[in-house]
Image: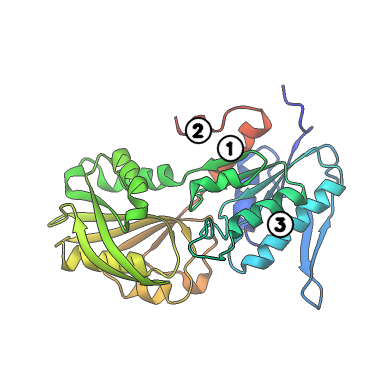
Amino acid sequence: MNFHGKNIKIFTCNASRAVAQQIASALDNGSVGKSEVTSFSDGEIAVSLHESVRGSECFIVQSTCAPVNDNIMELLIMIDAMKRASAARITAVIPYFGYARQDRKAKARDPISAKLVADLITTAGADRVLTMDLHAAQIQGFFNIPVDHLVGAPILANFFKKKIGNDTDEYVVVSPDLGSVTRARNFATRLGCPIAIIDKRRQRANVSEVMNIIGEVKGKKVILVDDMIDTAGTLCNAAQAVVEIGGATEVYAGATHAVLSGPAIDRIKNSVIKEVILLDTITVPQEKMLDKFTILPVAPVFAEAIERIYEDKPVSSIYV
């Protein structure tokens, strides 16, 4: 029996309205809670809740994507508003967790911004966090509240299974860098395909140089897998390498988070990549949409996780 809240209420800020509506539709309540998130003339965030949340189990859906700082503040202020309105329990549903790449001190006097954001969310009054594909899994330990960490690989894998069919020998899953090897290995296991690795050396931020391909991709169709596509430099360099150096015939890509900043769209448009499969943890603006993009929904997975959290059932068994 659940003792946390009398009912589920789904709310959203400005970054994830479509996903929140899909989650609410997948649940019995069918609609997003009535709220308004605006800003004053000086840029300060203003949040108004237009319905009671007293005693309710509240879930706030908000990706902390660009504009990152505005979206984080919207989330924090809405959490605070619900805490002061006597919500029974508040869960921050963060499909994409910004600042996740600042998870350690890479050099002297560096901040650990991911830890700071985790502290802010906890201090604001969140009772738990539900997120997907953190860039670094250890970020779960930055929180002093429960964190349910969903993965996007099964959604992407189901798509590619239908594409591949029984032709698993024709495909190779490729990790675009050494840091994504575990993710690529698990993905390859799901598909029943072999794995290869791109060995590259990064000269400076957002610039990478492909050095070598570990594994056999000649005459194969390649699936590049990563957790996010930011400027797309790593992805497009890897795609070029597997074709020009490795001799691959076709290149596909799959990623959970479509950050797509800076020159990403132009790079992907002009690359050898035939199709890019993305999840909608971040809404891709219409002006950035390409014919190469296929967007898959995450709402069904989040809706099931929310239902399990409310009923005090394990979230991990979603993937069993």
Q: Give the residue displayed 57% in from the left and 28% down from the top.
A: 314
**Quarter of the image where the C terminus is located:** top left
**First in residue order: circle 2 vs circle 1:** 1
**Could you give the CA–CA distance between mark 3 and mark 2, rounded to whole angstroms?**
26 Å
Front residue of 225/290: it is: 225
Percent of width and height locating residue 132: 53, 48
Q: Which residue is mark 2?
A: 318
Percent of width and height locating residue 13: 70, 58
Front residue of 117/183: it is: 117
Q: Could you tell me if the residues under marks 2 and 1 are in contact, i.e. CB atoms within 8 Å?
A: yes
Q: Which residue is mark 3?
A: 75
Asked which secondary structure carries label 2, the reply is: helix
Residue type at tag 3? Leu
**Quarter of the image where the N terminus is located:** top right
Q: Nearer the viewer, mark 3 or mark 2?
A: 3
Q: Which residue is mark 1?
A: 305
Asked which secondary structure carries label 3, the reply is: helix
Asked which secondary structure carries label 1, the reply is: helix
Q: Could you tell me if the residues under marks 3 and 2 are in contact, i.e. CB atoms within 8 Å?
A: no
Query: Residue 228, located in which quarter of the rendered image?
Result: bottom left
**First in residue order: circle 3 vs circle 2:** 3
Percent of width and height locating residue 43: 77, 75
